[in-house]
Image (cartoon, rainbow, N blue to C red):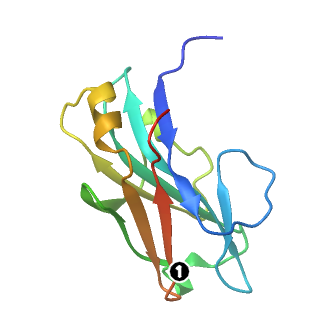
Amino acid sequence: MGCPPGHFHEYKFIGTELPHDGLAYTRIEFNNETDLHIKTGYYYEFIHEKENGLATVIKVNPNYDLSKDNVVRKVKSSIYGQLEKMDSLPYTARVYDTANTLMYNLTFEKRNERKTLKKIENDTISIELTNGKTLQFVRKTTE
């Protein structure tokens, strides 16, 4: 085993999530055809390009047709603003199974991880869905 390529600091979902078997994703009902599996947080990568920023990954069921329904209107941080839809994410936040996966990213200019962790305390990432719901994920104060 080698050293990790970076750190990923997850935000916690505010609301009721469905039972799930994966540790990294929050499962939330979207409609009668699919649930959403969401991971969102701050990443700090110290290999390759040494990137850092906010990332959100939203997976839907493999048989759900994403082309007929956008699912997401926008993803926004209360501190940093809107995350942009991407085709891939930096290494630390990377998703290997990209089928039926939506990815959003907001890369920061060079920042210190410790200072950024202090700044994002109580930041909220809001995910506005096309079904009218808004999901909120909060970065709690570190203890």
Q: Residue at x 27, y 30 (%)?
A: 115
Left-right relation of 141 to 83: right
Q: Quadrant of residue 81?
A: bottom left
Q: Is residue 50 visible?
A: no
Q: Is residue 111 above or below residue 41?
A: above
Provide residue 59's location: percent of width, then percent of height: 61, 62
127 and 66: which is toward the camera: 127
Residue for badge 1: 67
Q: Residue at x 52, y 83 (%)?
A: 133
Left-right relation of 143 to 108: right
Q: Give the residue furthest to the left.
A: 109
Name the kind of residue labelled 1 in the image: Ser
Left-right relation of 39 to 33: left
Provide residue 127's location: percent of width, then percent of height: 45, 70
Q: Residue at x 48, y 66 (%)?
A: 136
Q: Is residue 130 visible?
A: yes
Provide residue 11's location: percent of width, then percent of height: 50, 50
Q: Give the residue furthest to the top.
A: 2
73 and 41: which is toward the camera: 41
Quarter holding the N terminus is top right
27 and 139: which is toward the camera: 139
Q: Residue at x 75, y 48 (%)?
A: 22
Report helix, strand or loop for mark 1. Answer: helix
62 and 107: which is toward the camera: 107
Within 10 angstroms of label 1, few (less than 14), some, or many (20 or more) residues? few
Q: Is residue 111 above or below residue 23?
A: above
Q: Is residue 2 above or below residue 78?
A: above
Label total for image: 1
Provide residue 41's location: percent of width, then percent of height: 46, 47
